[in-house]
Amino acid sequence: MNKKQILIFGGCFNPPLNSHFLLAEQLLNEYSQIEKIIFMPVNSHYQKEDLIDNKHRYQMLKLVCDKNEKFEVSKLELEADRQLYTIETLRKMQEQYPEYEIAFIMGSDNLKELETWNCANELVKEFKMYLLERDKDDVENIIQDSKFLEENKTAFIKAKNNVTSNMSSTFVREKLRGGKSIRYLTPDEVRSYIIKNNLYQ
């Protein structure tokens, strides 16, 4: 019998969007082996423009995850003294949950760059990856066009009935700076937190 899986959903979540949670819920609906999804916000050491403080991104995620028994948010990367490589994060999570198989959620944009990641060979041999198509990407074509990906294609699972969204956190931040509404773009809890703490102004 196959082990139950825990999926790690990494990202900046700056801020978290409805589409993030919709994608996670879709994966839970489609794959009975997935026990839960853990959101893993990157550390503010990560070189990304406009990345707000760790505590705010963690709290926004937690407000939503606390209302879904299948969602959690982890401080693992936030509490590290540097930005961890993906393989380090996944190995630490595997140590934390030895009774589960740890897997990773990856967008097709990152799939294209995967060969350049730290310890890419070990990563694809140790962990399964659920692939989400972004924009007009076709993950089968991306895999076929890369010798590295083709040789390791058993590591990849193309998400069924993939919910695609071109909505970005950048778009939401720009709306906020322009004094526009972000209703229906983020969960209500996140929107209220942003307004209360005067974020992204």
Image: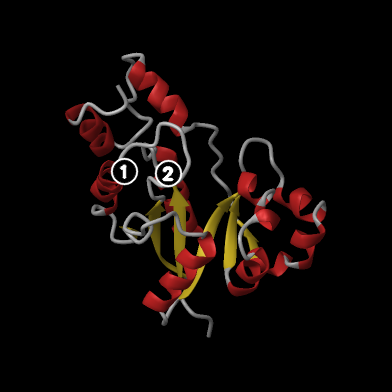
Going by the numbered disc 2, the residue's amino acid type is Cys
Q: CA distance from mark 2 to mark 1?
A: 8 Å
Residue 32 visible in the picture:
no
Does 140 sit above or below residue 20? Answer: below
Name the residue rendered at 62%, 48% in the picture. 110
Q: Which numbered circle lies on residue 12?
A: 2
- Name the spot of residue 119 as percent of width and height, x first: 62, 65
Quarter residue 184 falls in: top left
Which of the marked residues, 2 or 1, is nearer the chain's N terminus? 2
Q: Is residue 89 in sight in this rendering?
A: yes
Q: Which residue is mark 1?
A: 57
Q: Secondary structure at mark 1?
A: helix
Quadrant in which the C terminus appears: top left
**Hey, which quadrant is residue 79 in on the image?**
bottom left
Residue 173: image location, x then y, percent: 39, 26
Q: Position of residue 35 (x, y in %)?
A: 40, 69
